[in-house]
Each structure stands twice: as structure tokens, then as C-alpha cells.
Amino acid sequence: MAFSFHYLDDIAIADTAFEARGDSPAELCMASAQALIEVLAKASTVQHKWAQEFIFQEETLADLLFEWLSAIVYIKDVEGVVFCDSIVTVTTSTAQKRSEERRVGKECRSRWSPYH
């Protein structure tokens, strides 16, 4: 798989902007997720202690990507879980795009965790 991302420091001052690339919709989702994960926590320090699968169905790839990234932030904020990796499968049909993801990470035990 070939995917990559880089941060766009000159675009967002208070927030984070990045450009993600992938050879397929799944790789684009993985690159985007990894860019976001690296902002939320130092992924190399997060152990593989927790995994969860998610399924999203959206009409467009843009909507699918938005839901995917929003879920990563939501899970971190609500459940106190940060991720270190993601595995994404995107299936397309003429009607909808479907994404199945498996995220792997670690639950934060404290609100003041360095991963939070």
C-alpha cells in the first residue's frame, strides 16, 4: 500500500491542516486517519491494547472521509481512547460508498494523560 500525508503549516495557525494521498479510497482514508492520529497522540507510543470495528455508509467519498475522521476525534473525546493504527476497506457501488475500519489503540486512563 502506498499512502502518505504531510502537514500544511502555513494554512492553519490554530488548527491542523494536512494533505493526504493514497492510491485508492482506502489508502486515502488510512493516510488521513494517520495524519489525524499523529496530531492527537504520538502513535509510536500507543500500545495495541484496544481495537474496535466501525462501518460507515455514505454517498460520496468526501462524506465518508468526514465521518471517518470525525469518529476518531469523537472516540478520543468521549471514550478517552487514542489510536495508533487503522485498517480501512472501502467498497463502492453506484449507490453508496461503504467503509469498514478497524482502529487499534489504547484507552487513556486519565483526562490528564499525555495522549489526551
Image (cartoon, grey):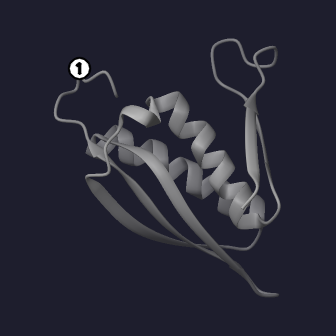
Query: Which residue is under mark 1?
Result: 112
Q: Position of residue 100 (x, y in %)?
A: 54, 73
Q: Quadrant of residue 94?
A: bottom right
Residue situated furthest left in the rendering = 109
Is 2 in front, or is 88?
2
Please determine whether, in this image, residue 68 is positioned above or below residue 36.
below
Under mark 1, the amino acid is Trp
Quadrant into which the C terminus falls: top left
Is 57 in front, or is 106?
106
Is residue 89 toward the left or the right of residue 3 in the image?
Answer: left
Instruction: Give me the residue at 57% from left, 56% from top.
Output: 68
Q: Position of residue 82 (x, y in %)?
A: 37, 41
Quadrant into which the N terminus falls: bottom right
Instruction: Give me the residue at 47% from left, 42% from top.
Output: 73
Please determine whether, in this image, residue 12 is positioned above or below residue 80.
above
Q: Secondary structure at mark 1?
A: loop
